[in-house]
Image (cartoon, grey):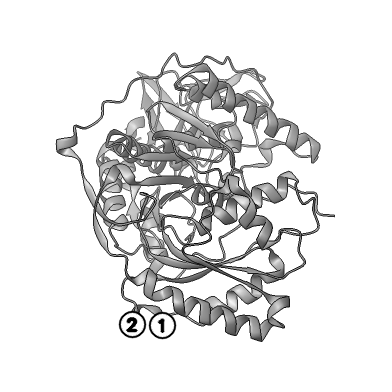
Amino acid sequence: MTIYNLEEKAIILKSGDDVAVAKERLDIDTVLKYCGRIIRVNDEIPIGHKIAVNPIQRGKSIRRYGQIIGFASCNIAVGDRVHVHNVGWKEFLREYEFANEAIPTEFYPESEMRTFMGFKRDDGRVGTRNYVAIVATSNCSASVSRHIADKFRNEVSKDYPNVDGVFAVTPKGGCSTRIDGADVMQLQRVLSGFAEHPNVASYLLVGLGCEVNQADYLIGNHSLQLDFEHRSGLILIQACGGIQKAVEAGVKAVQKMLPYANEFRRTAQPVSDLILATECGGSDSNSGISGNPAVGVAADELVKYGGTVILGETTEMYGAEHLLTRRAKNEIVGKKLVEKIRWWEHYAKTHDAEINNNPSPGNIEGGLSNIYEKSLGAIAKGGTTTVNEVYRYAERVTEKGLVIMDTPGNDPASVTGMVAGGATIIVFSTGRGSVFGFKPAPSIKVATNSQLYHQMIDEMDINAGVVLDGSSVTEVGFSIFEEIIAVASGKKTKSELSDVGEEEFSPWVLGPIL
């Protein structure tokens, strides 16, 4: 009989955890040694799934990451597989403390400041890409906007080598709702955020002419800081006389914008001007072990250089938010996060749902049992620094350091909000194999396990799965940070090489649509 040290076959994250996560498939009757005890595997344990290392009585809490990830729905014996069949979900009270674990950031001195090759804009912000955007004000003008952008597909770089392309911003809403309601206000923040994005040199607004979200209304909303006069244009389909005439007018307008956009050049800029959006999608149980903690290391590095990191997906903080309130810079910021959590509880109940409807079937197949377990792994993307602010969805981010944006857990909707807020680059970790890309911000995809990385090599930029093979999280995190600088300076990500990133635009729709 072969006896393996548990650490050879599985990972325990914190002393006192009730479960270990399998690094490889464990067959029935595999024998493991842990803390002087012998553990015989009672069930087949797929890679990334959990095995009990302590007996857990029915109704008692189950711990991973040193935190509660659920409650035993039946008695669980040592060696049992621990998953949705014996892990229950219910709400439990978290003790909120504020700012008691906020540690001042040790910034790198100015003499050690790193740089990247970016596009400096007139307002002082710095882009990582240089696009022209066609911005539809509602779904009524989305097709025309797409047709205009398609006229320039794969033809821009020949005559305008400093322009990354022309892309369309096409919402699926913008009408049949209250003109001054929360839904329109949120959509306007999104659209203005893309129009005025640091990665966008100039933009064309395209409206139908009779929709609720009128182009003039968008331009006239002074709270949006829309600089319409200097680098933009506007066409209305009804005023032009229909689709073909509107497309012709749009093409002419873009042709006038391209020489201006091409005047921008990449120059050396401090990495403190970078705004990083962090996202995880198609997650597995390894996401909280390899990919997300490594992204967190890169996030900490960027913060130490004076940059900005956005942690989104409020619903994937649920059950772990009390760990973030402790890192808030003050009680005001911490309570903002708690208010968002309470709003989501109400929102879910209003729509006859529960926050535990996330994780998805793919997440569950990958070993995640419920939202508490998913959240504890997800927040690792934000690293360890102080939480300096909590923003509304698509609100422009102005605070430096680590900030939180209130977004859904849905990947396209979440990233749409963070990019609208000003994120110029994205790091996206995945354990199941997301093929996510996003214009105008390049998306670096991090595989959480080596099997995925090699299976989808054409989609993955970084392999964090080497952590499971013995590499350190810190080492992988530093490699992600170097990739951030390289991509910010112009290196194409795998999703950019595949020309993926327009269909992922998906503003969060609050409703109702009437």
Residue 423, horizontal then vertical, whole percent: 44, 49
Q: Whole-Å distance between the Cαs marked 1 and 2?
A: 6 Å
Q: Quadrant of the C terminus?
A: bottom right
Residue 280, horizontal then vertical, whole percent: 48, 46
Residue on which disc 1 sits: 155
Query: Hey, which quadrant is residue 249 in on the image?
Result: bottom right
Label 1 with label 2: CB-CB less than 8 Å: yes
Element type at mark 1: loop
**How many numbered tags mark residues here?**
2
Q: Quadrant of the N terminus?
A: top left
Amino acid type shown at disc 1: Glu
Does residue 469 appear in this view? no
Residue 45, horizontal then vertical, whole percent: 50, 41
- Identify the residue at image location x=33%, y=53%: 462
Element type at mark 2: helix
Amino acid type shown at disc 2: Lys
Viewer-side residue, 438 vs 251: 251
Viewer-side residue, 371 vs 498: 498
Residue 267, horizontal then vertical, whole percent: 24, 58
Dot 2 alpha-carbon crowd within 10 angstroms: few under 14, some 14 to 19, many 20 or more: few
Residue on which disc 2 sits: 158
Above or below, comparing residue 424 to residue 478 in the picture: below
Viewer-side residue, 251 vs 308: 251
